[in-house]
Amino acid sequence: MNTDVLVVGAGPTGLTLAHELRLAGVSAVLVDKLAQRSTLSKAGGVQSRTQEAFDQRGLLEPLLATGNFPLGTAHFAGITLPLTRERHRHPWRSIPQVAIEGFLEEHLAAQGIPVRRDHELTGVAQDGDGVTATFASRGVIRSRYLVAADGGRSTVRSLLGAEFPGRPGTMTTVAADVRLGGEDLAMTHGRSADGHWVSVFPLGTDSQGRPLRRLSLGGPGRSLPREAPVTEDEIRDGLRAVFGSRVRLLELRYARRITNAARQAARYRHGRVFLAGDAAHVHLPIGAQGMNTGIQDALNLGWKLGAAVHGWAPEPLLDTYHAERHPVAAAVLRNVQAQSLLMDQQGTGDPDLVAAKELFAALTHLPAVQYHLDDMLSGMGIRYPMPGAEDHPLVGLPAPDHDLGPLRSHELLRRGRGVLIDPADRFAKVAALWPDRVDRAGQGAEAEPMLIRPDGYVCWAGNPDDLEPALGHWFGEPR
């Protein structure tokens, strides 16, 4: 066996997973078919829950120190949700995918896990003991498990013959990284009377400190074949259609056409092979939900694979990856399709659609509606189905970040282990049965007792009699 886990694909999902595996104390090999890391920004925003998870691993502050990543405001279908900005410790922030990839790749290399590039996968075969991966270079890597994090056109998924049902793309829009002049557009969604539209988001600054923007545009006649190059004249024409002479293009750094295809793998687990990130789900990139969902796939799967390699994983633990993450991505696909419809990206001007969006926009003035949409878009409202979830309001949700004296509860998760918050010092005896998997803390703090999984989700709170069964359910037989 060459390694415990082979991760195919060194985007945000694969890089995050490799970090989780290292933290779990298992060996990992990370491969990518590209000869060098992409310099394209791709996704441009990081949700509150993803930032919270990076904070739980001690990665957020070092990541933010690498550049200028401005705060933003959540939106749904181009309708801003201003009441949500201060709801969470970590508001939505503009961090381009390329910055996340660069940071994580350098961090992993320093930990002894370099990305092995120029590794084009050509074959996958599995048996009862492991997985054999073959490459175009005729190299072979043998692993206990393999994770496909190789994107929407996943080679692994294709080799598996995995079902990938859904809808093919029916239109394209333009996404571009630009520098703009004229009227300051930090964040805006503009639309002309004849249906042309432009969305602009901050992307930090370039090496000379000049503001960069992520720009998306579309409208009547702008849905071109995906392979057609995006030109500067096309960007200028799109800006002119919405803003007239108030905004001008100074520099086009990168552009591509994106489709509204919406597909999701029927199964995330195929024996010893798992699908994660865009290999498991693709959709129109609105709000960087694809990147964030993929990173959270990795956070969910990493500790479970570690438990399986170490031999203490309860029998159904690996199956909970699909059970927990498949519904999350399915909900993302639904909200993206709803947003795409309300945004009328083809600029039809359908009066029924206009009326529906006007009504929806009026509803978003209600705080309860803004908070509901924010819970959905930020990732903070994800609730996993788990024992006790129906009996306690915290179980299944991301753990609150309590101040426990010298440390916050999220900082206790940096070892990649479970955490038992025990303010009244009642559970030392039961916790001592899992000393290699669960840390106990919080004595004397003003916090509710709870058990937190390594990925930051509460898996027990409330009835003391349920604690030991919860420990066994998630952390296996006691030592």
Image (spheres, rainbow, N blue to C red):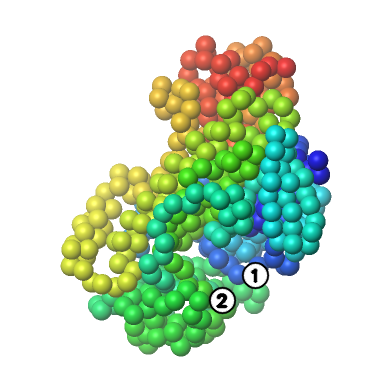
Q: Amino acid at mark 1?
A: Thr
Position of 81 relative to 402 (above/below) = below
Position of 355 relative to 401 (above/below) = below
Category of crowding for the residue at label 2, using alpha-carbon neighbours closer than 10 angstroms: few (below 14), some (14–19), many (at least 20): some
Observer-nearest residue: 468 or 210? Answer: 468
Q: Residue at x 53, y 27 (%)?
A: 459
Q: Residue at x 68, y 31 (%)?
A: 307
Q: Amino acid at mark 2?
A: Tyr
Left or right of residue 354, residue 176 in this image: right
Q: Position of residue 377 (x, y in %)?
A: 42, 50
Q: Position of residue 369 (x, y in %)?
A: 30, 47
Disc 1 marks which residue?
Answer: 39
Residue 203, image quadrant: bottom right
Residue 101, image quadrant: bottom right
Left or right of residue 353, residue 256 in this image: right
Disc 2 marks which residue?
Answer: 254
Camera sees residue 338: yes
Q: Residue at x 60, y 70 (%)?
A: 40
